[in-house]
Image: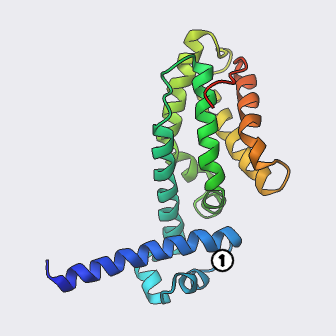
Amino acid sequence: MTPATTRRRADAERNIEAILDAALARLGRDPSASMTEIAKAAGVGRVTLYGHFPSREALVDTLFDRSLADADAVLGAVDVDAGRADEALARLVRSSWRVLDRQRTVLTVALRVLGPERVRDRHAPVLARLERLLRRGRDEGVFTAAAPPGWQVTAVYTLMHAAAQEVDEGRLDAAEAAETLVSTILGALGGGAAGGGR
């Protein structure tokens, strides 16, 4: 690889990061911000922007991928095998909320641009981890077996996203959301009060 090629590649990577950072900031202020506004905020021309992201959907898709990678790193560090399943779930919900609270803008835009089904599909690894934990809790007797595990996963996923929407609309304080989610989710699953593991 020639020095010129290396330089062009490094410039392209810098432009991509600048575009994604600008998109996150701009969409955070205005979820309907145009590609032109994002290009201006990133300090690049429209040709450069569209060269990397041929559509708004492609840009949001990449931004969403980046947020999911961040979420996976944080949630992967949560030990869901230690202690009782309800305590592990409380830890997972608290960590999930911290990530979701940081990424609420990306979620809002992704739901609009990519649609709820694609957003849900992209959460598959996280939801699979959650389902394993819920099955363990059912085996331990701390979660009810009255509803199918898949439905319980959907309930947790829906409550997490509902909390983000409530915070966005000013009906729930972001600082209180994690504990509200823990008590609501454990209550719905038949789990006890798992206050530990904060």
- Residue 175: give x, y in percent of width and height: 75, 46
- Residue 182: give x, y in percent of width and height: 71, 31
| Crowd tier of the residue under label 1, counting other residues whose Cα lies within 10 Å: few below 14, some 14–19, many 20 or above | few
Q: In this view, does 72 lie to the left or right of 37?
A: left
Q: Name which quarter of the figure residue 5 lies in.
A: bottom left
133 w.r.t. 161: above or below: above
128 w.r.t. 36: above or below: above
Snapshot colouring = rainbow
Residue appearing at x 80%, y 48% in the figure: 173
Residue appearing at x 61%, y 84% in the figure: 37
| Number of disc labels | 1
The amino acid on which the numbered mark 1 sits, given as a three-letter code, is Ala
Q: In this view, does 9 lie to the left or right of 139?
A: left
Q: Which of the pair 32/169 is nearer the observer?
A: 169
- Residue 33: give x, y in percent of width and height: 66, 77
Q: In this view, does 165 lie to the left or right of 148?
A: right
Quick one: which residue is furthest to the right in this view?
171
Q: On the rendered image, what quadrant is the C terminus found in? A: top right
Quick one: which residue is furthest to the left in this view?
1
Q: Mark 1 points at which residue?
A: 33
Q: Which of the pair 195/9 is nearer the observer?
A: 195
**Helix or strand or loop: what does disc 1 sit on?**
loop
